Image (cartoon, helix red, strand yellow):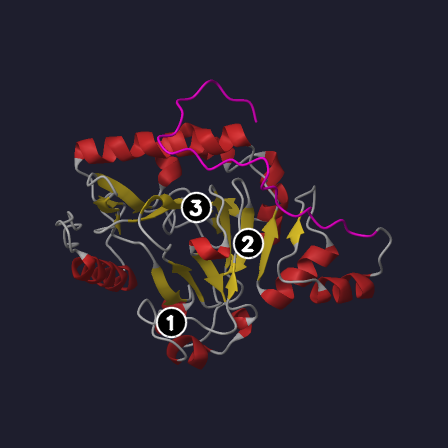
Amino acid sequence: MSMTAQPAPRHPPRWDPADAPPAAFVEPEGLSAEAAKALGEQLPLATRFGLGEAITPVQDAFLAKHGFIIYDRVADRDEVNTILAEVDRIEADLLAKGERKIFGVPVWFGLDPDGHEYLFRMGFTSVYSDFLAGFVRDARFEPIRCLIGKDARIGDREKDGVVFNRYVRAESSLRPNLAWHTDALRDVFYNGKMPGPMLNVGLHFDRIRPTDGGLRLLPGTHTQSAWSTLFSKIHFVSDGPDRRELAVETWPGDLTVHDGRMWHRVVAAPGTGWSTLRRSMYVPYVADSYQPKSEDSATPLYMRIFDTIVRWKAARKAAQFKPQIPQKIQ
């Protein structure tokens, strides 16, 4: 997509031409439906795919079996840098205005490795950026929208909107990690049964190796029962390694789709400092009735619980200096 010149991000990704990702999988032509399904189910978990004009049968089979899929660098270098610079700008605006909650959803600030207030997570990011609002609607993402549903739309003001995460590990970082959880907890809690597919679409902005921490998934658990969702792990508390987990390795510009019903977590990077920085953005595709948030929207119960746990863990880790923990949600 065309862009005007934008400021450079404060912390650009670690671009390394010598560290290119494995080539995206090239799908054989002329496969029958049965052969495509069999191939998709047999491919290695680390397979990377190219995002074309449509989701192919092989890609669809891979996603259905494992609950996730990785698309190779769908955003280019200029777009990655522009998005990161936009988030820097939004952070400065939020700090200047003292905003700690948007449409009822908390904005989490902690301290960065230099001891300054730093944005770790915010929702509704595209509401604050015309560039981001246009980027997530670019034609290249049409196959992803159709994967969610033919009538799916971008929920800029629905649910949590476009969510931007920034993890960096410091003595008093607010969210250096995120314990095991599923996104189905809310639905199971209220309805007593598992929801349908909950596909999370994420853009990734840093080169992350398994040794750098990052996203971990339990492939295949998107088909688990409501009982397993409630009791096989303690949401946002259980944080130990699982022998089944997969470390999701990314390069700047990668796009991932994972089913939120599966167990997933974010592992803290080893060490501290800006070298541990990991950034991602999740785009909400909504197919149900239009339910926009507003400035007076209440904070959901599950989000209050999440916020309490985040603040409690941050307080425990405060060692060298005191971070500014987000105020308690009213």
In this rendered view, identify the residue nearer to me: 29 or 285.
Answer: 29
- Kind of residue at disc 1: Gly
Report helix, strand or loop for mark 1: loop
Coordinates of residue 71 in the picture (x, y in percent) = 61, 48
In this rendered view, identify the residue nearer to me: 276 or 91.
Answer: 276
Magenta span main SS:
loop
276 to 16, vertically: above or below: below
| Residue numbers of the magenta segment | 1-28
| Quarter-of-image position of residue 234 | bottom left
Q: CA distance from mark 2 to mark 1?
A: 24 Å
Q: Earlier in the sequence, mark 1 or mark 3?
A: 1
Label placed on residue 257: 2
Report helix, strand or loop for mark 3: strand
204 to 11, vertically: above or below: below
The C terminus: image quadrant: bottom left
Q: Earlier in the sequence, mark 3 or mark 2?
A: 2
Coordinates of residue 36 in the picture (x, y in percent) = 78, 61
Q: Is residue 210 left or right of residue 91?
A: right
Residue designated by label 3: 280
**Residue 294 in view:** no
Disc number lying in front (2 or 1): 1
Q: Earlier in the sequence, mark 2 or mark 1?
A: 1
Magenta region includes residue 11 = yes
Graded by Cα atoms within 10 Å as few (under 14), some (14 to 19) or many (20 or more), the crowding at tag 2 reads many
**Residue 306 in view:** yes
Farthest residue to the right: give it: 30
Residue designated by label 1: 240
Residue visible at 55% across and 54% down in the picture = 257
Q: Is residue 237 left or right of residue 214?
A: left
